[in-house]
């Protein structure tokens, strides 16, 4: 995810390469590779890393959040904007770890950021200023589409679009297997499936009709589409997708509550 942001920012010319600094916990080879690939700066010296920084992006795994924030917090100031892309780590949890008032934007992008097609939702705390909101939008717009939500909606966003690419890959996998079973070769099947999904998504994006209306328009009575849809309905595919997203949302809520509870317990 961090590399996707670096690539998007540079391609859009949002920030000059000389003003982008990166670090990681200990993988110096990876850090050197990223620095050379994009022509940006890297350092393990935190004084050098944070000196003059306006925006700090925390792009670590949730399990590493506490350690990363505790290591950085003495270098973070009230003038900086802290942007978190750590799944399940609430703004409250970040504030507890920082132990100081700081502007925080919590974002949930998805892995399509790698091809600059992410669907990203962002929540902010009450210290984030108007100019910082604009900066956050510009930042995430470099890797796709950005919208702002209340933080209590981010678990639902995680279940829907955060995990969403995996659901689509699962669907593609099933369609590929089906295509081969009815006589198509793998590459032809994949080409047709991918273009079909791109076309359908574009139709939903540009049409004034709802997805339900678009589906009904191509479902002629007694036709092939109707035959296929009936199987999906009989197999409960619609309900399965609903339960899938609910389960992912619930898991996101659980992970967030567990992390916050652990942080509170350790502070007591």
Image (cartoon, rainbow, N blue to C red):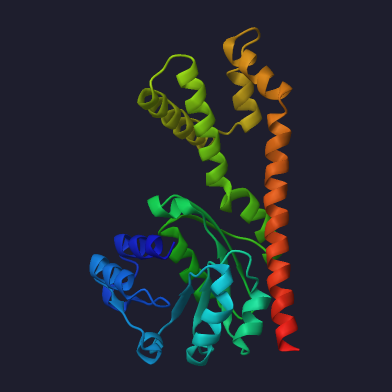
Residue farthest along the top direction in this orientation: 222
Using the rendered image of the protein, determine whether residue 67 is visible from the camera's viewpoint: yes
Quarter of image, res 233: top right
Question: Toward the viewer: 174 or 253?
Answer: 174
Question: Toward the viewer: 53 or 229?
Answer: 229
Residue 5 drawn at (x, y percent)? 40, 63
For residue 14, side relative to residue 134 (left or right): left
Quarter of the image for the N terminus: give it: bottom left
Using the rendered image of the protein, determine whether residue 16 is visible from the camera's viewpoint: no
Quarter of image, res 106: bottom right
For residue 198, side relative to residue 151 (left or right): left
Total residue callouts: 0
Residue 238 drawn at (x, y percent)? 70, 32
The residue lying at 39 percent from left, 77 percent from top is 26
For residue 66, side relative to residue 235 (left or right): left
The residue lying at 58 percent from left, 50 percent from top is 163
The residue lying at 71 percent from left, 74 percent from top is 260
Residue 187 drawn at (x, y percent)? 36, 27
The residue lying at 68 percent from left, 72 percent from top is 259
On screen, residue 111 above or below 170: below
On screen, residue 192 above or below 119: above
Quarter of the image for the C terminus: give it: bottom right
Residue 72 drawn at (x, y percent)? 49, 86
Question: Toward the viewer: 187 or 162?
Answer: 187
């Amino acid at each position: 995810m961090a590399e996707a942001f670096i690539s998007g920012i540079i391609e859009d010319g949002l920030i000059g390469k000389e003003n982008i600094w990166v670090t990681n916990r200990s993988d110096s080879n990876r850090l050197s590779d990223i620095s050379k690939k994009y022509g940006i700066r890297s350092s393990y010296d935190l004084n050098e890393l944070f000196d003059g920084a306006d925006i700090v992006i925390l792009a670590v795994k949730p399990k590493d959040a506490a350690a990363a924030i505790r290591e950085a917090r003495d270098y973070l100031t009230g003038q900086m904007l802290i942007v978190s892309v750590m799944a399940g780590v609430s703004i409250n949890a970040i504030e507890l770890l920082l132990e100081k008032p700081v502007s925080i934007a919590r974002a949930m992008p998805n892995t399509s950021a790698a091809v600059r097609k992410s669907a990203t939702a962002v929540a902010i705390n009450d210290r984030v200023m108007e100019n910082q909101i604009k900066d956050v939008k510009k930042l995430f717009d470099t890797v796709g589409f950005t919208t702002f939500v209340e933080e209590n909606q981010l678990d639902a966003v995680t279940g829907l679009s955060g995990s969403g690419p995996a659901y689509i890959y699962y669907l593609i996998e099933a369609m590929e297997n089906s295509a081969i079973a009815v006589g198509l070769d793998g590459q032809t099947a994949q080409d047709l499936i991918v273009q079909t999904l791109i076309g359908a998504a574009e139709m939903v994006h540009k049409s004034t009709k709802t997805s339900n209306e678009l589906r009904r328009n191509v479902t002629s009575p007694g036709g092939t589409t109707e035959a296929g849809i009936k199987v999906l309905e009989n197999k409960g595919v619609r309900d399965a997708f609903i339960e899938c997203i609910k389960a992912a949302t619930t898991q996101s809520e659980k992970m967030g509550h567990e992390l916050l509870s652990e942080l509170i317990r350790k502070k007591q």
